């Protein structure tokens, strides 16, 4: 009976020591390997990455210019990109600064080489709807949808 108790005690002590070894009990002779602070091998630690410095652009001033030299001498030929929304109506004239297949229309005076708007048909991009007019050129837009029936001045 004493033999059984001794064998059980030895097995119990051996099992505890085996578990301690498997689950990493501290061994003063063997240093532990450390992971970077990112938690996974191969990741950068915060000290290894310094983000670039960012400085926001200067805020424009709302004060008007003091000198008249800031005002242009004459208006440019093409309208400003900050112009009002392009909303052509029948009877107005437009100037095409693009090409026939890729037009860039601007409201203009009815001068030679410009186009007079004969009709505006909302809700469609079908230029065949201009067939009822005496047009020479038709342009369609998608946002909002409409067709302009034009005649060269």
Image: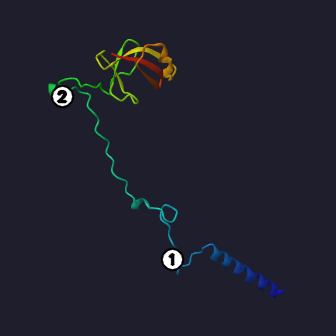
Q: Residue furthest right?
A: 1
Question: Farthest residue in the top direction?
Answer: 91
Residue at position x 35%, y 21% in the image: 84
Q: Which residue is at the front of the view, 43 or 4?
A: 43
Residue bearing mark 2: 70
Q: Nearer the viewer, residue 94 or 6?
A: 94
Q: Is residue 26 above or below residue 47?
A: below
Residue that appears at 50% across and 69% down: 34
Q: Secondary structure at mark 2?
A: helix
Q: Position of residue 145 (x, y in %)?
A: 49, 23
Circle 2 Cα neighbour tier, 10 Å, few/some/many (<14 / 14–19 / ≥20): few
Residue 3 lies, in percent from the top left, at 81, 88
The answer to which quarter of the image holds residue 99 is top left
Taking the image as shown, residue 3 lies to the left or right of residue 25, namely right
Q: Secondary structure at mark 1?
A: loop
In the image, is 63 to the left or to the right of 49? left
Q: What residue would you read off at disc 1?
A: 31
Quadrant for residue 63, please give it: top left
Instruction: Rate crowding at label 1 as few (under 14), some (14 to 19) or many (20 or more) other CA atoms within 10 Å.
Output: few
Residue projecting furthest to the bottom: 3
Give the percent coordinates (x, y) of residue 23: 63, 72
Q: Residue at x 56, y 78 (%)?
A: 27
Count all numbered tags in the image, as a single digit.
2
Q: Name the foreground residue: 139 vs 24.
A: 139
């Amino acid at each position: 009976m004493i033999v059984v108790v001794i064998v059980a005690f030895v097995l119990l002590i051996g099992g505890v020591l085996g578990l301690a070894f498997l689950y990493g009990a501290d061994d003063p002779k063997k240093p532990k390997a450390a992971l970077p602070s990112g938690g996974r091998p191969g990741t950068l630690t915060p000290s290894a990455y310094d983000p670039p410095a960012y400085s926001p652009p200067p805020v424009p001033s709302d004060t008007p210019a003091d000198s008249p030299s800031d005002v242009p001498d004459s208006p440019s030929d093409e309208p400003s990109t900050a112009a009002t929304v392009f909303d052509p109506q029948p009877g107005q004239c437009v100037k095409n600064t693009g090409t026939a297949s890729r037009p860039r229309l601007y409201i203009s005076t009815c001068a030679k080489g410009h186009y007079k708007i004969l009709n505006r048909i909302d809700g469609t991009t079908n230029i065949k709807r201009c067939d009822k007019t005496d047009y020479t050129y038709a342009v369609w837009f998608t946002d909002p949808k409409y067709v302009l029936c034009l005649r060269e001045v």
